[in-house]
Image (cartoon, rainbow, N blue to C red):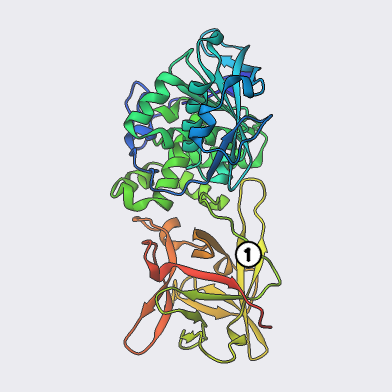
Amino acid sequence: MRAISFILGGLLLLGINTLAEAIPFGHSNGSGGTVYALGKNIINQDDSNDFDKLYIPEARFPSFSDHEFLDSKDSHLPKIVDSRRYYDIKTKQWLYSEFYIFQASYLAGSKIEIQVSYDNGDRSWHDAYLKALQYANQFGHIPPALRKPTHSITIHNNYSGLMGGSNNIIIFEERGAEHIKLGSIEEALFHEATHNYFNDLVSKKDNPQYQLWKQAQQKDNNYISYYAKNNDYEDFAESLIAYYAVKYKKQRIGNLQNAVFKAIPNRMHYFESLNLNLTHFDIPITANQNYLISNSIESHITNLSHSSQIVDDVSTPNYSHLLWQFEVLYGGKYGGERYILNVKKHDKTSCLDIINGGFDDQKVHLKDCGNFSGQNFSLLPVGINKYNLLPLWQKNFWESSNPYFSCLSLIEDTHTTRISLEECDGSERQIFTIKPSQLK
């Protein structure tokens, strides 16, 4: 899993310092990075996949089934072999060769060209189609935002490995087959897609975000894996999948999350500051629109008062005082959106806020709106119109010796139901439905 951008810009090697802690994953010879050691079950076949179809660009067959498509006669198909440039790792140069050309479409995100080696005519287009279909489908498991900078996937058999960079992923078939057999192909593709996502950042050392990354790296004084020590390209890719596993798939890695936090806490903070959307769902929240926010357990609308933090029932005849608006705070190329949530009650507009410090530390309340970190929230999509709400200020993530992510949670007490901040656990009490309302 090698980044190929260094071919153009020079291999960036990191100095090997005395590390504060033992590297948690991989082997000292540089093999076995997070894709193998952290777990092959970070992403699996049960996870979201938005792959749509594979077709020949010049002649689409949307009404054909795979079986009908494969049974079509070659003479009825347009020319599907074309010349493409690829990187040859043995000679360390860019070469041109002939490939079968297919196009993969996805329900969320851009189309991707799939190139399968022609092998001087020894490979049939049927075989090439099946090979392209296999990897195009697997790539559908990769979050669309992370997948976006990848414009093409090249499949051939001249070397054993996977490579990412320059908006392309190269899959060498022998190694790809090994990943498929081991069940780690999704994690490997995630790793390679990361190279493309952060390619510009790593290759341009004057980028302020790169400087922040280097600061985090130096503060950690450690790496998530031995493979991450190779260069910054690998460090980004190895570290991001560890961050993804902790934030999005915590239940699948168990206590291994402690090793991640111990090794790279500052890199984890860096990724969290970007507010990446590593899910398969868009966040269609817009400003100046009224929304109802409800929880699936009781179908209640959240209405936080200064004193009792109660939850009002949606069946209330006039619930205009329960309508929320979102101020959208944009995060730039590498960051997603954060939001300020405000509600108007008794002609007064208040903002959802997390108390930082004092006797009521980490409690949820309503407060006069202002430029406060406690009023910045990120939305983690977990389904259509369904979200976890995470505050920007994550005390247990940034400061605790036992770090974890906190989510807004519905808490049922003896006499009332309220909103509190609890460790994210994937339960329904932390899943809120946010839908536009026509009420004013």
Is residue 22 visible to us here? no
Q: What percent of the width, then of the height, locates residue 409? A: 42, 71
**Is 289 located above or below residue 378 in the figure?**
below
Tag 1 secondary structure: loop
195 relative to 418 in the view: left or right? right
Residue under the point 52% across and 61% down: 384
Mark 1 crowd level (few <14, some 14–19, many ≥20, 10 Å Cα): many
Q: Nearer the viewer, residue 61 or 392?
A: 61
Residue situated in front as seen by the camera: 120 or 252: 120
Q: Position of residue 3 (x, y in %)?
A: 53, 26
- Is residue 29 shown above or below 64? above
From the image, which quarter does the C terminus lie in?
bottom right
- Report x, y in % for residue 304: 51, 82
* Residue on which the image places disc 1: 285
Foreground residue among 80 and 345? 80
- Inspect the image, locate mark 1, and give the three-letter code of the amino acid beneath it: Ile
Q: Please say whether residue 208 is visible from this viewpoint.
A: yes
Residue 351, picture quadrant? bottom right
Judged from this view, the residue extending furthest toward the left is 255
